[in-house]
Amino acid sequence: MENDQESFDFSSIGDVWLELRAELGNRFVPFSELLALELGSILPVGRATGENVDLYAGDVRLGSGEILIVDSTLAVRLADLNDGEAEDKARSQQA
């Protein structure tokens, strides 16, 4: 199939729920560092201030977004969407 999105009727799955996740960053730590954590501990996650967060549906990266505060609640504004073909090529080159 050349373009799956054009040939698939997405309305047939419109009621399916997906978990969306905004990932600020991650970090590996030794167990001893985990045990030493206490209230007020600071955990750097490797992202610069103002850098976009990654957006996921399940384990699939959809794109990135900007963190905002809307009515005293954290929110994410969509900044870009991934091109599925580009993502597939990048994954196959890493393998």
Image (spheres, grey):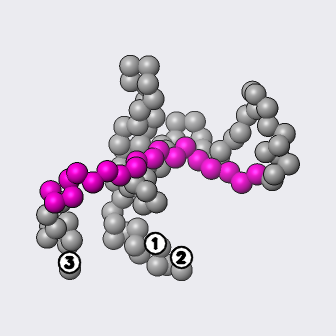
Q: Distance between the Cα atoms at labels 1 and 3? A: 19 Å
Amino acid found under the numbered disc labelled 2: Gln
Q: Distance between the Cα atoms at labels 2 and 1? A: 6 Å
The quadrant of the image that shows the N terminus is bottom left
Q: Which residue is mark 3?
A: 2
- Label 2 CA crowd tier, 10 Å (few <14, some 14–19, many 20+): few
Q: Of the residues under marks 1 and 3, which one precedes in the sequence?
A: 3
Please identify, in this view, whether the residue under mark 1 or under mark 3 is nearer the observer: 3
Q: Position of residue 93 (x, y in %)?
A: 49, 78
The answer to whether 28 appears left or right of 84 in the picture is right
Q: Which residue is mark 1?
A: 90
Q: Residue at x 71, y 39 (%)?
A: 43
The quadrant of the image that shows the C terminus is bottom right
The part of the chain drawn in magenta is 11-29
Amino acid found under the numbered disc labelled 3: Glu
Q: Is residue 63 visible?
A: no
Circles 2 and 1 in contact, beta carbons < 8 Å: yes
Label 3 secondary element:
loop
Q: Of the residues under marks 2 and 3, which one precedes in the sequence?
A: 3
Q: Position of residue 62 (x, y in %)?
A: 38, 55
Q: Position of residue 7 (x, y in %)?
A: 14, 70
Nearer to us in this view, 1 or 11: 11
Q: Which residue is mark 2?
A: 94
Does the segment drawn in magenta span residue 70? no
